[in-house]
């Protein structure tokens, strides 16, 4: 596989692939499927017919069955159209496509990532990405250090060079960076009402293929899954709603969401864990029912990376991010506490010392 270049811009993605000896004589649509695994063959065929694939040196548009030969170069273009659209109750959401820059120096960005922005390009998510936004803004390359799920908003580090990225990446691996997430949950009969508790259930993937998106949990003394540890601190309760802070001590996939579920606190808007794998698929395929929407209440899981504490010279530095607009709106419309008063409480808790290394 020879990739000559990739260009990521907010409105267009372009990549050039050179045909290798073993690919010589292959159909154009089959050749592109090697690189564009998130597209179906029918989607690739349509893009070829629309002129989005060009074999350099030949008249185009081409046919999907056109043959490619060794050393030829194929340039493939994807325009930003409906690829990253999100819907709620049948209407397209207005997504925030710019991240707030909390801090910047010659080596590092600290940003507040909005919901539905990817960390970096992957699969069909090529445009609304933190690295693409920052590279387009600065005209310089960036280096992702860690990632947040698309639906999760909040504080994220992005390096301006490989040295910074490598250093802070190692800090994450050694658990030297302390993380704090704000969440909104709906309690069930398994929640014991604790104001603080530890979750140490072991986590592993729920199945093969597409079901790998679902994470299972097992008792701490189980031989299944991998070690995981999250500390929870409840800040406000009102009826069945529980708002709090989660301090993950390890970095497993969906860790906070699954640990919250294990202790009777599935997150508001969580299609997988407040809902189910089948419900998640219904939302993904745009045929979720009114009952599905009513149960979720909001379009994404209510999880926000509120603060990060990172090594900084011989000290530590804490960066925080405001509660995002969608969660503020839900709080102000559904709870007696205001989002402004709640944020003051969160700041008080975060500055009390829990973000220092143990």
Image (tube, rainbow, N blue to C red):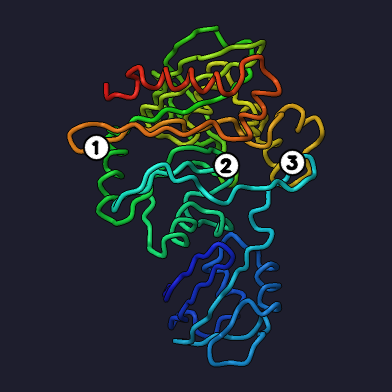
* Crowdedness near tag 3: few (<14), some (14–19) or many (≥20) residues, C-alpha within 10 Å: some
Q: Residue at x 56, y 54 (%)?
A: 128
Where residue 248 sits in the image (x, y, percent)?
A: 40, 27
Q: Is residue 55 above or below residue 194?
A: below
State which quarter of the image contains the N terminus.
Answer: bottom left
- Asked if residue 134 lies left or right of residue 296, the reply is left
The residue identified by callout 2 is 115
Along the polypeptide, which appears first: circle 3 or circle 2? 3
Where residue 237 sits in the image (x, y, percent)?
A: 59, 12
Direction left: furthest residue: 314
Residue 195 is at least partly visible in this image: yes
Mark whose residue sits in front, 3 or 1: 1
The residue identified by callout 1 is 312
Q: Secondary structure at mark 1?
A: strand
C-alpha distance separating marks 3 and 2? 14 Å
Checking the image for residue 10, the label placed there is: none
Q: Secondary structure at mark 3?
A: strand
State which quarter of the image contains the C terminus.
Answer: top left
The residue identified by callout 3 is 88
Q: Is residue 129 above or below residue 31?
A: above
Residue 200 is at least partly visible in this image: no
Where residue 322 sits in the image (x, y, percent)?
A: 50, 32
C-alpha distance separating marks 3 and 1? 41 Å
C-alpha distance separating marks 1 and 2? 27 Å
* Crowdedness near tag 1: few (<14), some (14–19) or many (≥20) residues, C-alpha within 10 Å: few
Q: Residue at x 70, y 77 (%)?
A: 50
Q: Residue at x 58, y 82 (%)?
A: 54
Along the polypeptide, which appears first: circle 3 or circle 1? 3
């Amino acid at each position: 596989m020879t990739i000559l270049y990739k260009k990521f811009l907010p409105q267009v993605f372009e990549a050039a692939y050179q045909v290798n000896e073993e690919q010589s004589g292959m159909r154009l649509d089959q050749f592109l499927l090697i690189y564009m695994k998130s597209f179906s063959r029918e989607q690739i065929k349509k893009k070829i017919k629309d002129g989005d694939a060009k074999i350099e040196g030949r008249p185009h548009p081409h046919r999907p069955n056109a043959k490619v030969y060794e050393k030829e170069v194929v340039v493939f273009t994807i325009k930003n159209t409906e690829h990253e659209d999100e819907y709620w109750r049948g209407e397209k959401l207005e997504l925030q496509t710019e991240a707030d820059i909390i801090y910047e120096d010659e080596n590092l960005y600290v940003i507040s990532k909005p919901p539905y922005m990817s960390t970096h390009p992957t699969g069909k998510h090529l445009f609304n990405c933190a690295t693409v936004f920052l590279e387009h803004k600065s005209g310089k390359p960036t280096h992702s250090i860690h990632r947040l799920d698309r639906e999760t908003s909040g504080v994220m580090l992005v390096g301006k060079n490989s040295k910074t990225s490598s250093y802070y990446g190692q800090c994450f691996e050694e658990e030297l960076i302390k993380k704090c997430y704000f969440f909104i949950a709906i309690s069930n009969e398994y929640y014991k009402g604790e104001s603080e508790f530890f979750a140490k259930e072991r986590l592993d993937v729920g199945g093969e293929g597409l079901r790998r998106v679902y994470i299972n949990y097992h008792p701490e003394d189980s031989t299944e899954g991998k070690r995981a540890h999250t500390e929870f601190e409840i800040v406000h309760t009102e009826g069945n709603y529980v708002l709090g802070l989660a301090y993950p001590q390890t970095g497993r996939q969906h860790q906070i969401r699954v640990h919250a579920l294990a202790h009777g606190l599935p997150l508001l808007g969580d299609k997988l864990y407040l809902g189910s794998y089948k419900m998640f698929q219904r939302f993904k395929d745009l045929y979720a029912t009114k009952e599905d929407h009513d149960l979720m209440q909001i379009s994404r899981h209510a999880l926000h990376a509120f603060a990060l504490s990172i090594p900084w010279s011989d000290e530590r530095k804490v960066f925080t991010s405001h509660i995002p607009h969608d969660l503020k709106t839900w709080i102000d419309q559904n709870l007696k506490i205001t989002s402004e008063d709640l944020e003051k409480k969160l700041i008080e808790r975060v500055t009390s010392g829990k973000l220092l290394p143990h």
